[in-house]
Image (cartoon, helix red, strand yellow):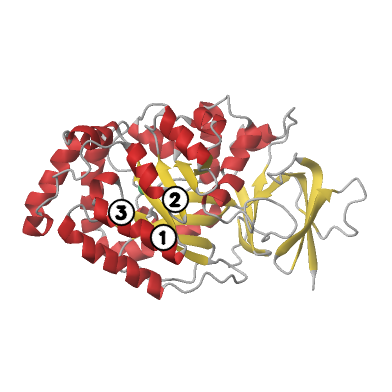
Amino acid sequence: MTRLTLRARYVFPATSDSIPDGFVAIEGGRIVDVGPCRAGGPPAIQNDLGNVAIIPGLVNAHAHLDFSRLSAPLGHRGIALPDWIRLAMAYRRQAADQLPSALFEGLSECLRHGVTTVADIVQPGWSPIAAPLNLAAFLELIGPTADRVPVAIQLANTYLKNAASPGENSKGCVSFGLSPHAPYSVHPQLLTAIVRLSIEKAVPLAMHLAESPEELELLQNGTGPLRDLLDDIKSSRGPLVAEAGAAPHRGSRPMDFLRSLSPAFRALIVHGNYLSDDEIAFLGTNALRMAAVYCPRSHDWFGHQPYPLENMLRAGVTVGLGTDGRGSAPDLNLLAEMRLIAKLHPGVGLDWVLKLGTLSGAEALGRADSIGSLSPGKRADLAIVALPDRDAKDPHELLFDSEKPVTACWLGGEQAWAADRQLA
Ligand SMILES: [Zn+2]
């Protein structure tokens, strides 16, 4: 088997200190060795990449790739979530024929930004594709009323039956999950059934939770702008959603949903912007099977209160990063999300910022055994990032206090994209 060795000014394994003048050796699609060139190093350097960093391929733990054809987010900065949902629903109706091609454009854009694994929320009717990178496809399930529950369960069953086994190949690997959309759009019976399916079929779940103040108001009192939205949907769709707006979870709070989700095979809590301290502690206690997903630029678009990232990390919560979709973020650049975290959360060490976009995302998806760090035995999924021509006390500053782009990425030991030539 041929061994390929890549040398770079810095190698950032994500599980240990950065390595100046480091190398990564790849064989059979896997990483076989990582270390410093100067201390003996590998016998023969085949590819000296120069003034760049080699980092683990980035993990985007939450995206809506069907919005990938949007050139700018919907609405305006500070828009309330219920108003944004109205715009998103209108866009989906108006751009329905473009949504399948948007998915492929989104996947290509991910690669250009060094993302080698993406967790995407897909819509009913989606069927497995040959993805150019690792794709975790979570089927969105909506059923706010009891009469919609059987249809949604049927959709979930069919989806999982048609889902091929996740087997790996030299490029991406496709895996499957379910996404009970949000507390206000999922009836309690549906949530129970989905959690049961998650356990039976060993598939992960992803649910939007504690995303907005309007959601908390609806859960607690059954009132507010989200209630108005549900009522409007009810009147526009007629008797099929007769109970929509009846706020089936009235008198509840995010903790009730965390408890409902906790027996699942795995659960990603998407956003969690307004989780309270006891809810964060609950996620910390259950960090092996539950994770939060922070989408910094989407969070910024909505103007939410500061994200409780430091609290989460202190509580031991597994936190992955997502871009969300282009409906609420400018693009699918996960490195830009990490750079924003470095600015917004100076209390979080830059080594942690690297982990959030790599290893923690892999842990959130239950894939840390094969991706997320530059460790011998793992898939050779790498991102190459250009570095500025200066020194820094902490080499992570060269990655995050910089605007330099990703210049290439590797999947399973093969170059999947390069800025100067597209190979795949
Ligand atoms: Zn989302």
Marks 2 and 1, Cα distance to the nearest angstrom? 9 Å
The total of numbered circles placed on residues is: 3
422 is higher (above) or lower (below) than 261? below
Mark 2 is on which residue type? Ala
With 281 as the anchor, is 69 left or right in this view?
A: left
Mark 3 is on which residue type? Leu
Residue 162's x, y, as percent? 39, 75
Q: Earlier in the sequence, mark 2 or mark 3?
A: 3
Q: In the drawing, what numbered circle is on residue 191? A: 3
Q: Earlier in the sequence, mark 1 or mark 3?
A: 3
- Asked if the residue under mark 1 is in contact with the one under mark 2, i.e. CB atoms within 8 Å, the reply is yes
Front residue (pair 379, 155): 155
Mark 2 lies within 8 Å of ligand 1 (Cβ measured): no
Residue 392's x, y, as percent? 73, 29
* Quarter of the image with the C terminus in it: bottom right
With 8 as the anchor, is 334 left or right in this view?
A: left
Residue 328's x, y, as percent? 35, 42
Look at mark 1 in the image and give the residue it sits on: 198
Residue 248 occupies which quadrant of the picture?
top left
* Residue at image coords 53%, 32%: 315
Q: Earlier in the sequence, mark 2 or mark 1?
A: 1
Marks 2 and 3, Cα distance to the nearest angstrom? 12 Å
Marks 1 and 3, Cα distance to the nearest angstrom? 10 Å
Q: In the drawing, what numbered circle is on residue 267? A: 2
Residue 406's x, y, as percent? 60, 48
With 79 as the anchor, is 168 left or right in this view?
A: right
Residue 365 visible in the shown view: yes
Residue 101 occupies which quadrant of the picture?
bottom left
